[in-house]
Image (spheres, rainbow, N blue to C red):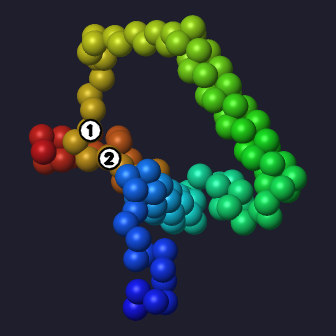
């Protein structure tokens, strides 16, 4: 086995072993980011990952950054306009002087409010 890979037979320096560990970490991070991009509901990351390297990827990245900035700007504008225009609600707790029926009567029903108010049994229900 040592004859097949002579670079593994020599002892690695601390710097070389650190470089190898860092490359493994970067590879794992890249895999996790790709998985996140493929499963993300944030539209644009999957397009960015699928774009070919070079100008197409840079163009997609620029468009994605502009869209994120525009989204943040619009949401902050909506929040600012909501905060600057307060809604005032007046609740009047006085009771009205009318008899509210216990049974709600449908307008298509053959019963009328007059008939219900005339019947003593329904009136006291």
**Observer able to see residue 37:** yes
Q: Which residue is mark 1?
A: 101
Label 2 secondary element: loop
Residue at 22% from the left image edge and 42% from the top image edge:
102
Examine the rendered structure and indicate whether residue 50 appears above or below residue 79: below
How many callouts does the rendering have? 2
Give whichever of 110, 67 is nearer the camera. Answer: 67
Left or right: residue 115 compared with residue 8: left
Give the label on residue 74, or none: none
Vertical side of 1 occupied by 84: above or below? above
Query: For residue 66, which quarter of the picture?
Result: top right
Give me the residue at 65% from left, 55% from top.
45
Q: Position of residue 57 (x, y in %)?
A: 79, 55
Q: Residue furthest right?
A: 55
User: Where, quadrant-wise, is the C terminus in this rendering?
Assistant: top left
Q: Which residue is mark 2?
A: 104
- Image quarter (top left, top right, bottom left or bottom right) of the N terminus: bottom left
**Residue 104 at x, y = what percent?**
32, 46
Residue 74 position (above or below residue 47): above
Q: Residues within 10 Å of mark 1 (few under 14, many from 20)?
A: few
Front-most of 77 and 115? 77
How far across and down, in percent of the image, does residue 61 sit?
Answer: 75, 47
Is 25 displayed left or right of 49 in the figure?
left
> What residue is shown at x 40% (from left), y 77% (from top)?
9
- Whether tag 2 and tag 1 are in contact, CB under 8 A, the answer is yes
Check disc 2: other Cα within 10 Å, few if <14, some if 14-19, many if 20+.
few
Q: Is residue 108 visible?
A: no
Residue 42 as seen in the image, left or right of residue 15: right
User: Does dot 1 land on a helix, a strand or a loop?
Assistant: loop
Q: At 61% from the left edge and 22% from the top edge, which residue is drawn?
A: 76
């Amino acid at each position: 086995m040592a004859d097949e890979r002579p670079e593994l037979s020599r002892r690695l320096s601390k710097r070389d072993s650190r470089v190898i560990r860092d490359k493994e970490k970067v590879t794992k991070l890249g895999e996790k980011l790709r998985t996140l991009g493929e499963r993300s509901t944030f539209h644009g990351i999957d397009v960015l990952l699928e774009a070919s390297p070079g100008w197409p990827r840079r163009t997609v990245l620029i468009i994605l950054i502009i869209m994120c900035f525009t989204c943040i700007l619009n949401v902050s504008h909506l929040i600012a306009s909501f905060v600057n225009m307060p809604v005032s609600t007046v609740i009047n707790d006085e009771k009205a002087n009318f008899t509210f029926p216990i049974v709600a009567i449908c307008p298509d029903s053959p019963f009328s409010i007059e008939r219900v108010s005339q019947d003593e049994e329904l009136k006291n229900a």
